[in-house]
Image (spheres, rainbow, N blue to C red):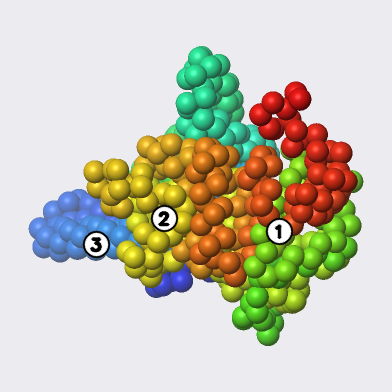
């Protein structure tokens, strides 16, 4: 798991290596300073030797400057490595999400993906920076300070052996409780992001139903849950501080008591026993050893906190798309013919009911096909199989006489243009949105596509025409205008197959008829699949498919279905003027 994530360090590898190396230099200088100060006091001040005072003072200044320089370098390298690691990790995760199929995306909620790309990565960044600095500083400081203290007095250094077990027991005793809480907190973050996302995305619905207070309460409930869990975890971790202070002060008192007796017994002779300068340096080493252990405990706590983000990011990085291009993939679509051969489909392996069952259908290239059915009959599911947004569970689906699973995914989807039931426009100009269909489209091609989609007139009515800015989600255009822009965008791909998933539901019948007329005249060789609720939108189609409960109920032309299908006849009659007749 860790190896997978550390691949994201890449070009920042040297910064990640230099950060701990320079930290070793900083620690060495900090451990050396108390020894120099002890020598300054014992051999300079006590002996009243001004030459020793000058030399030792210069050594102190040099050590301090070196420690400062190493510290600055270490912080710089760690910051560069940490931010670079986070940047690459976000890129890797985001690129992985782009490769996901719909079924992969269904496995992770949108809010969860956002949390993993933001909060989880931020936590891993902090942990990584702490690891390449504090995780090196703490053990190095502890080891070097202990060695230095033992070189002065082995007997007094044994006092540390009493404090260490107490600290270790306290630290590892708190960990199990804290880990469970933090694991719960990061799952709650998903709920928080989901609440915010739903509210912002559906703010117009919220305001129209005057549900602001309800949404505020929902947010407060989730936010309060995070507050309670974090407070509980921090209260438990806060016990680490007092325990640490008790050990520091206890060691200081013990060293003061026994060290003072040793100084008095030796007569403060530098060559015999313990001197005042050495005793003062022992106080410093005591603080360094125990503070190093506190740093180590902080690193350990951060590692415990980051276990959940680590696992969640690893899950996203290692999720394999279940839709991939095969080896020696077909790179050309011969034509727009479509064949469903005993196709069945379910959204997950654990689903008990198929969304589509035993579908057999032949659509010749260039044909216009209308697809009708009640809500939930499988219309959208049927057309989503054509560009391999999902794979069939059973049977075979062919485009141009070739199984869609043999095509290169990019080639297949470039030849199938799909205007989804939920139209999406992106922030930018109208031209920017249209060029999603063809990045190299000329102005003339865009105008032609918009005329086919009956969008040119309303675009030219805007002051800035095709350079009009579209707000995020297309909120500054009407539903019908949004649909026509999405149709024009799809036409710019010049596809062999065009799928309109109820994409003219927001336009009037006159405009709908004009769009269908333009399709018949200008793109006769393109296979057109039109999902609609109005029979008027598909009655001129070459083939009309009637779906019910995931099965094909009937197939035929408008006249044929009127003659033999009671369901079709009832729907047609109810949608006509004077239907009661």
Q: Is residue 513 left or right of residue 465?
A: right
In the rendered image, residue 325, in percent from the top left (x then y), is placed at 66, 74
Dot 2 or dot 1: first in sequence order is 2
Q: What's the residue at 74%, 77% (across, down)?
A: 402
Q: Which mark is residue 210?
A: none
Q: In this view, does 496 lie above or below 94?
A: below
Q: Name the residue under label 2.
A: 451
Q: What's the residue at 88%, 46% (across, down)?
A: 564
Dot 1 or dot 3: first in sequence order is 3
Q: Mark 3 points at which residue?
A: 69
Q: Residue furthest bottom?
A: 328
Q: Residue 542 carries which label?
A: 1
Dot 2 or dot 3: first in sequence order is 3
Work out whether residue 86 or residue 229 is closer to the camera in this orientation and state it: 86
In the rendered image, residue 133, in percent from the top left (x then y), is placed at 42, 57
Q: Are marks 2 and 3 in contact (CB under 8 Å)?
A: no
Q: In this view, does 428 lie to the left or right of 565?
A: left
């Amino acid at each position: 798991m860790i190896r997978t994530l550390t691949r994201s360090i890449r070009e920042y590898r040297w910064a990640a290596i230099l950060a701990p190396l320079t930290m070793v230099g900083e620690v060495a200088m900090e451990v050396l300073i108390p020894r120099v100060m002890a020598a300054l006091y014992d051999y300079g001040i006590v002996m009243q030797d001004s030459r020793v005072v000058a030399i030792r003072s210069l050594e102190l200044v040099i050590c301090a400057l070196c420690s400062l320089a190493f510290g600055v370098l270490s912080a710089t390298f760690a910051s560069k490595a940490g931010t670079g690691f986070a940047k690459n990790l976000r890129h890797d995760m985001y690129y992985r999400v782009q490769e996901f199929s719909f079924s992969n995306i269904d496995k992770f909620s949108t809010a969860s993906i956002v949390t993993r790309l933001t909060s989880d990565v931020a936590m891993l960044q902090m942990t990584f920076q702490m690891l390449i600095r504090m995780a090196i500083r703490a053990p190095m400081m502890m080891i070097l300070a202990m060695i230095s203290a033992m070189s002065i007095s082995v007997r007094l250094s044994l006092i540390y052996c009493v404090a260490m077990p107490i600290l270790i027991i306290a630290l590892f005793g708190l960990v199990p409780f804290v880990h469970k809480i933090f694991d719960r907190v990061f799952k709650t973050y998903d709920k928080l992001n989901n609440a915010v996302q739903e509210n912002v995305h559906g703010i117009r619905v919220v305001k129209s139903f005057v549900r602001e207070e309800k949404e505020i309460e929902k947010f407060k409930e989730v936010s309060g849950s995070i507050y309670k869990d974090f407070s509980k975890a921090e209260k438990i971790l806060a016990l680490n501080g007092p325990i640490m202070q008790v050990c520091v002060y206890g060691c200081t008192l013990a060293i003061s008591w026994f060290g003072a007796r040793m100084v008095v017994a030796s007569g403060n002779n530098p060559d015999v026993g313990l001197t005042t300068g050495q005793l003062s340096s022992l106080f410093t080493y005591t603080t360094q050893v125990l503070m190093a252990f506190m740093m180590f405990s902080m690193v350990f706590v951060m590692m415990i906190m980051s276990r959940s983000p680590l696992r969640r990011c690893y899950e996203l990085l290692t999720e394999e798309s279940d839709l991939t291009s095969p080896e020696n993939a077909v790179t050309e679509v011969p034509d727009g013919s479509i064949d469903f051969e005993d196709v069945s489909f379910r959204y997950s392996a654990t689903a008990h009911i198929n969304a589509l069952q035993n579908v057999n259908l032949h659509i010749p290239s260039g044909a216009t096909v209308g697809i009708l059915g009640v809500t939930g009959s499988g219309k959208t599911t049927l057309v989503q199989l054509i560009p391999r947004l999902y794979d069939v569970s059973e049977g075979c689906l062919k485009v141009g006489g070739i199984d869609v699973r043999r095509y290169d995914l990019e080639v297949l989807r470039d030849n199938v243009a799909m205007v989804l039931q939920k139209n999406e426009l992106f922030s930018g100009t109208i031209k920017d949105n249209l060029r999603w269909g063809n990045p190299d489209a000329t102005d003339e091609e865009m105008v032609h596509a918009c005329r086919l989609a009956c969008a040119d007139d309303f675009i030219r009515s805007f002051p800035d025409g095709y350079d009009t800015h579209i707000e995020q989600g297309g909120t500054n255009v009407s539903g019908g205008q949004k649909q026509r822009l999405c149709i024009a965008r799809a036409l710019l791909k010049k596809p062999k197959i065009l799928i309109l998933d109820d994409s003219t539901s927001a336009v009037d019948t006159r405009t709908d008829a004009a769009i269908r007329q333009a399709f018949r005249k200008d793109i006769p060789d393109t296979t057109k699949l039109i999902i609609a609720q109005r029979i008027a939108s598909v009655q001129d189609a070459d083939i009309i498919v009637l779906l019910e409960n995931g099965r094909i109920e009937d197939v035929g032309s408008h006249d044929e279905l009127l003659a033999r299908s009671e369901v079709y006849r009832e729907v047609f009659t109810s949608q006509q003027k004077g239907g009661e007749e």
